[in-house]
Amino acid sequence: MGRDVLGCAQTGTGKTAGFTLPMLDILAGSRAKARMPRSLILEPTRELALQVAENFVNYGKYLNLTHALLIGGESMDEQKTVLEKGVDVLIATPGRLLDLFDRGRILLADCKVLVIDEADRMLDMGFIPDVERIVSMLPKLRQTLFFSATMAPEIRRLADAFLQNPREITVSAPASVATTITAGLLWVQEREKREALRRLIRREEVQNALVFCNRKVDVDILFKSLRKHGFNVGALHGDLAQSVRFQTLEKFKAGELQILVCSDVAARGIDIGGLSHVFNFDVPYHAEDYVHRIGRTGRAGREGRAFTLATADEAKAVAAVETLTGFPIPPMEIEGLAPVSPEEIQEALKATGRRRGRGGDSRSRDSGRGDRGRGEGRRERESRPEGGRREARGGRSEGRRDEKEARAPREEPEVRRERERDDRRDDRRGERDRAPRSGDRVLDEVNRDAAREWSAEDRGREDRYRRDGRREHYRHRQEDLGPSVVGFGDAVPAFMLIPLPRPKRSSENEAEAA
């Protein structure tokens, strides 16, 4: 029908095939022009874009259609070459697409179908301004398909901005968990979290598993810990090079790696056939990410198992997940580990503020005592008479001054005047040292020093020359030195002020004239 579509379905239910197969049928009737793709699929991550490209190749095996994959970390020259030949389907991440558009290598005027996949992830990653700019480059007459696994109010507002009279298709309730997934929640102490994960992996019949962490640094730490204990493990997060990310993901899909420790970069859209387990080493900050994480298993009707490790400090994040999904996560236990009491969980739920990460609360544990101390000090100050503290301080200072003057010996008037004169001289010298030293100021100081040296050393010799009838002038004058050096700012070295040639004496001029 060509109408805009707003699709919401669980992860692993085939949204990629839901828009790829109709696009192949629509595009099979004509050909694309150079640098003018006929359809565009926007993806939030490189891994997801690569997966969609693989699906397009598989689905369109017997169709004479071409595609281009525009993602970061790949050669731009190769992507330009493919675009010059003309492509029917363009699969891209927003950053690389805008880069090529600004270079004039691509035109979107002939794009009739736009697919915005994983829209909620686009919103989380801050791609919405780029998406809005890309949409403004497309023709007004087009079909737009908007897909998301969750339908938060922000996503609904984005859909209203991008879609015109859409047909809404909801396969299942938003943010719902597939019934093929068996979930479990294990409460552990912070110091025993890694040990609990190792025991859980050994107890379960793990074929292959994803282990999710909230932070990239935790991914590296947990990866090294599991490898040290003999597990066949890999790491995947956004700070790794693109080639390393692709290589690690391919090894995991091929079965060369049993466990993949990753961040949420692998939580959206990645389809790993036969994934048996998902472990949440950290409870996600956003409850929607829990649905996407465990949605990597139990796909296409297969059975899957998902386990979450939580400390008492993460009780609020667990409550947010259970509120979103509408069902409590079944608790489980492992023998030999220190239990977490219900009282600790309830205390964490009642605590104010949300703790970001596993390092503990951002506020100090002694904040209460500090507040009480500040409050008592404030009350003490308020109980004093107004201005009493200043009066007391002023009285003490005046008393010290009087006592000092009383202890000081009586000075003679001449001695006192000499001391005051020395103090003023020191003050002037200090002001001169603190003042900015421009080139002219340095020149003046050099001339004054030269004149002072002359008056101290050569005055007698000048007198002798004057008595002998020879009028020699050795006194340095300011015009004898050159101007300040340009380019040295306020710090011109004195040795760079080169004296100018001394003017000739009158006797020399008379001799030359003769």
Image (cartoon, rainbow, N blue to C red):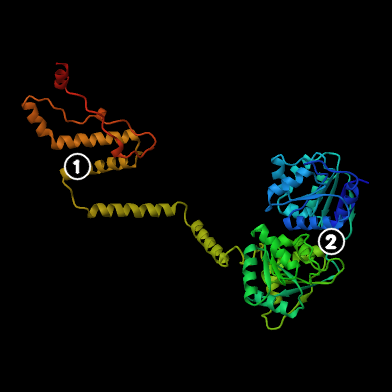
Left or right for 374, reference 305: left
Where disc 1 sits, the SS reads: helix
Q: Quadrant location of the C terminus?
A: top left
In the image, is 391 to the left or to the right of 82? left
As shown in the figure, which amino acid type bears the numbered disc 2?
Answer: Gln
Mark 1 is on which residue type? Arg
**SS assignment at label 2:** loop
- Percent of width and height locating residue 178: 85, 66
Residue located 78% across and 53% down the image? 119
Residue 422 horizontal side relative to residue 192, left or right: left
Residue designated by label 1? 417
CA separation in Å, label 1 and label 2: 94 Å
Q: Measured from the top left, where is residue 322 in percent x and y?
A: 78, 66
Q: Provide the residue designation for mark 2.
A: 10
Residue lying farthest left?
468
Residue under the point 74% across and 52% down: 123
Front residue of 193/14: it is 14
